[in-house]
Each structure stands twice: as C-alpha cells, then as structure tokens.
Amino acid sequence: MATKKQKKLHSDLLTNDPNKIYAALKDLRIHGTRESIPLVIDQLGKDLGDVIDKEVITILGDLKDKNTVEFFIDALEDPKNVEVQKGLLQAIWNADLKIDEHLPYFVSLAMKSDYLTAFECFTIIEQAAIEDDMEALNLIGDLREAQMREHESKDILEMIVQSLNGKVIG
C-alpha cells in the first residue's frame, strides 16, 4: 500500500508541471515503489524536455528490482511510446533486467524495428540466459527468415543469431 508521501509523488507525476514532475522524480529515487514504475515511464511520452527525459532514463536504468521487465514491455507495445523505444531499451540494459522469459518478445521486436532499435534489442538479448534450447532454435529460424527478406537490420539480426547460437552450443 502506498504511503501518503508516495501518493503525493504519484499525484505530482500526473500533472503537466515540469517542476513538480522533476521534484517527484528526484524523490521517487528514495521513496519509489514497484507501482511507481509505470508512472515514471509515462513521463517519457509527455515531451517535458531533455532534463526530465534524462532523469527518467537514469531512474529506470538504476532499478534494483530486476523482475520489472513487464512494465517495460507494456510501454514498448504502446504506440505512443514509439519515439522513446530506444531509451526504454537502454534502461532495460542499464538496469540489467531479467528478460529470459521474454526472449521471444525482444527477438520479435528486433525483427520489426529499425537498425538502432534492433541494436538495442541485441544488447539486451546478448545478456539473456537461454531457458529452452528448442525455443532458441525456433527463434534462430525466425531470424534467418527475416534476414532473407531484405531487412534493414540484417547485420544486427545476424549478430542476434550468433549470440543465440553461442548460448545453445555453450
């Protein structure tokens, strides 16, 4: 249950006042909870300036709870966040979040993204552990098919294939 302080911080994040939002973000570094994460992510889509965007990315990149990747996936799937996908992916990598269960999602995202977004996916995929060799082999097959379709990120997709191969072969 959120404390009075946390409720106030969450309320401040729902405003359009950059000063309140920035102050709330600073306080959330100390008083934030798991429930604060979606509200912090939502600040990226508000176009409140580089200072707030940098603070959000820094907070997200410093997350201590390594099992919060679902919040990021929800944000990555939201069409309003297309412009901030790279920042969200960088925060996942910086926070060293556990994506092992979500490996197919990040491979799929790489296959349908531009070059830089695919590269960010690669950096995340590279640090993931393979839980199911058969799943990894299926993903490699999907990547090979994508490479055959003159994909903008063909080179990055090959890097992902090599990374997955290395994990399966060990």
Image (spheres, rainbow, N blue to C red):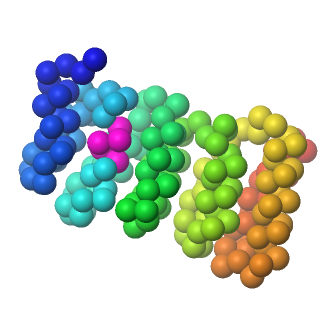
Q: Is residue 30 magenta?
A: no
Q: Is residue 27 left or right of residue 106?
A: left
**Residue 109, horizontal then vertical, whole percent:** 61, 60
Residue depicted at 75% across the width and 82% down the height? 150
Q: Could you say where residue 170 lies in the image, as x and y percent from the top left?
A: 87, 41
Dominant SS of magenta comes to helix
Which one is nearer the viewer's eye here, 36 or 28?
Answer: 36
From which residue to which does the magenta span run? Answer: 37-41
Residue 53 visible in rendering: yes
| Quadrant hosting residue 151 | bottom right
Q: In terms of image quadrants, where is residue 26?
A: top left
Q: Is residue 73 above or below residue 117?
A: above
Image coords of residue 153 (percent x, y) = 67, 74
Residue 168 is left or right of residue 39, and the answer is: right
Residue at 49% in and 55% down = 77
- The x, y position of residue 27, in whole percent, is 19, 34
